[in-house]
Image: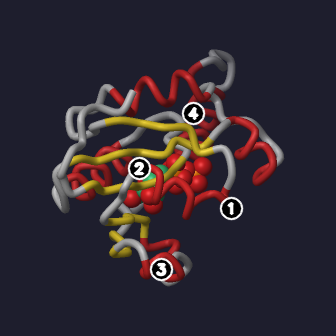
Amino acid sequence: MVKNNKSKKIVITFGTFDLFHIGHLRILERAAALGDVLLVGVSSDELNFNKKKTYPTYCQQDRMEIVNAIKCVGGVFLEESLEKKREYLLHHKGAILVMGDDWEGKFDEFSDIVEVVYLQRTELISTTEAKNRIIDQAGKVYDPVFP
Ligand code: CTP
């Protein structure tokens, strides 16, 4: 899925990107603006399960397809292990690693091979928040007896 990247400045970022929302779009657009090609490591279903003890709402194939369809994204790959970040960065010839500022300082160990940039997260939105809002609204919409 990765398009022709020869002699381009490659930016790499990682994430789950479940229930794609405006915070996801904004960080991808700002990450892409830092270089020539943006590659996104979309975390696998198993990786999410191991981390959070629950699977994402959308499966990895769908999440990858959605992220790959975003205009500023040059390609996607599956992130199967948190321990393989260095391997992914080297394999895809990344020049810049972008992470949300919730990870500030946590990826500085890779600054020997890439420039590490932490971008500010968009406020007041996350996949978890969206899920909770849907649950909350569903109760109100589908309960005609107690509006
Ligand atoms: N992100 C962002 N602003 C937000 C939410 C996410 O910039 N409001 C960024 C994250 O910092 C990360 C990328 O989007 O670089 C993918 O984040 P992900 O963990 O998939 O999204 P969340 O919405 O934070 O998901 P969750 O609630 O499950 O943690």
Picture residue at 64% right of the left edge, 30% below the top: 57
Picture residue at 36% right of the left edge, 30% below the top: 68
Element at badge 3? loop
- Residue type beneath disc 1: Glu
The answer for how far apart the CA atoms under marks 3 and 4 are is: 30 Å
Element at badge 1? helix
Up-down: is 74 above or below 143?
Answer: below
Picture residue at 65% right of the left edge, 28% below the top: 139
Say which label, 3 or 2, has the lower sequence index: 2
Asked whether residue 126 appears in the rendered view, the answer is no
Left or right of residue 73, residue 91 in this image: right
Task: Count how many numbered circles sit on residues in the image.
Answer: 4
In the picture, the quarter occupied by the N terminus is top left
Q: Nearer the viewer, mark 4 or mark 1?
A: 1
Left or right of residue 33, residue 143 in this image: right
The answer for how far apart the CA atoms under marks 1 and 3 are is: 18 Å
Q: Are marks 3 and 2 in contact (CB under 8 Å)?
A: no
Say which label, 2 or 4, has the lower sequence index: 2
- Residue type beneath disc 3: Glu
Dot 2 crowding, Cα within 10 Å, few <14, some 14–19, many 20+? some
User: Residue 72 at what x, y percent from top left?
Assistant: 21, 40
Say which label, 4 or 1, has the lower sequence index: 1
For disc 1, the marked residue is: 83
For disc 3, the marked residue is: 104
Dot 3 crowding, Cα within 10 Å, few <14, some 14–19, many 20+? some
Of residues 61 and 140, the one nearer the viewer is: 61
Left or right of residue 71, residue 13 in this image: right
The answer for how far apart the CA atoms under marks 1 and 2 are is: 16 Å
For disc 4, the marked residue is: 134
Say which label, 1 or 2, has the lower sequence index: 1
Q: Are marks 1 and 2 in contact (CB under 8 Å)?
A: no
Mark seen at residue 92: 2
